[in-house]
Each structure stands twice: as structure tokens, then as C-alpha cells.
Amino acid sequence: MKNDALGATGQWIPRSIDIITRDLARAAIAGWIVGLCYYNWLADIATPIPWWGHFLLATLGSMASVILVGLVVGLPIVGITKLLNGRGARLVDALGISLAAIFAFLAADIAIHFVERINYFASARAVPGPLAYLLSRFGL
């Protein structure tokens, strides 16, 4: 059985950092979208979020999850891969990709509730703040 980390000459070929981060980003985006589907879009009791909230979660949330998960998971994985110089790095890469998807999946629930809170305080149902009270008191 031929090992895919060995080249034609039998020397170890380390994976490129670009390939590792590309795979981590793909896993983070997939985990984020699956998290949005699981926690809100296909949930039995969906969280009330307006259309702009769904747009922000789908677009900006996926970009932010790639950046944040890349910092939390990607940097240590790339560092370990550089230290191992290709030996056993495939296992580390697979672990990092799995962790990226799991972290992004769990972060989607937190982001959904954050957008729900923003919508609550931006709506008319929220208790007005002190500035709104003062402006209404003086008829402004």
C-alpha cells in the first residue's frame, strides 16, 4: 500500500499551508451553514429573525466564522504541521478540519441569539433608553 505523503522518490512531501487553510475554510463555512439550518431555518421552533438578520447571518457570518475559526483552529494546526514537517500531519489536518466544522456549527447558535437580541432592542417592543425618554419628555 502506497502512502500518499510519500513522493515518487520516497521522500516526505509536506502539505502546503494554503491547502490546509483552504480545507479549514471550507469546513468552517459548511459547519456554519449547517448550524444555521439546524438551529433556525429547519428548527421546530424557529427564532424570530427579520430578513436582514438572515442576510447578515448567511453572508457576514460565514466570513466571520472563517476568520475566527481560522484563528482559533487554523493557526495551531498550521504550526503543528510545520513542526511535524509532513510526518503525521494528515491526521492533524483531519482533526483541525473536524474541529473547524464543529466550532462553526456551535457558533451559529450564538450568532442567531445575538441577532435576535439586536432585533428585539431595535424594535418598538423594547423599553426606550434614557435618551429616548428625555427626547420624548421635552417633545423633541
Image (spheres, rainbow, N blue to C red):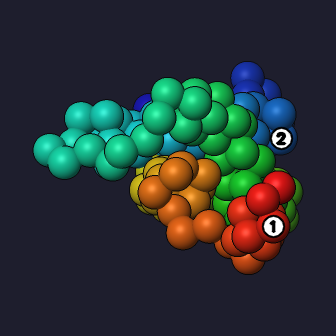
Is 34 on the left or on the right of 80, as rendered? left
Q: Which residue is mark 1?
A: 138
Q: Amino acid at mark 2?
A: Ile
Determine which residue is flagged by label 2. Answer: 17
40 to 26, vertically: above or below:
below
Q: Dividing the image into 4 quarters, which one contains the N terminus?
A: top left
In which quarter of the view is residue 140 placed? bottom right
Which label's residue is closer to the chain start, 2 or 1?
Answer: 2
Estimate the x, y position of residue 131 in percent, counting from the top left.
79, 70
Residue at image x 46%, y 57%? Answer: 125
Q: Residue at x 65, y 47 (%)?
A: 65
Rendered residue at 62%/67% (across/down):
128
Between 85 and 25, the one lying in front of the other is: 25
The answer to whether residue 37 of the structure is visible from this angle is yes
SS of the residue under disc 2: helix
Mark yes or no: residue 2 visible: no
Quick check: 131 left or right of 46?
Answer: right
Give whichever of 91, 55 is nearer the camera. Answer: 55
Residue 121, horizontal then vertical, whole percent: 57, 59
Residue at the image point whose x is 26% and y is 44% from the top: 46
Q: Amino acid at mark 1?
A: Phe
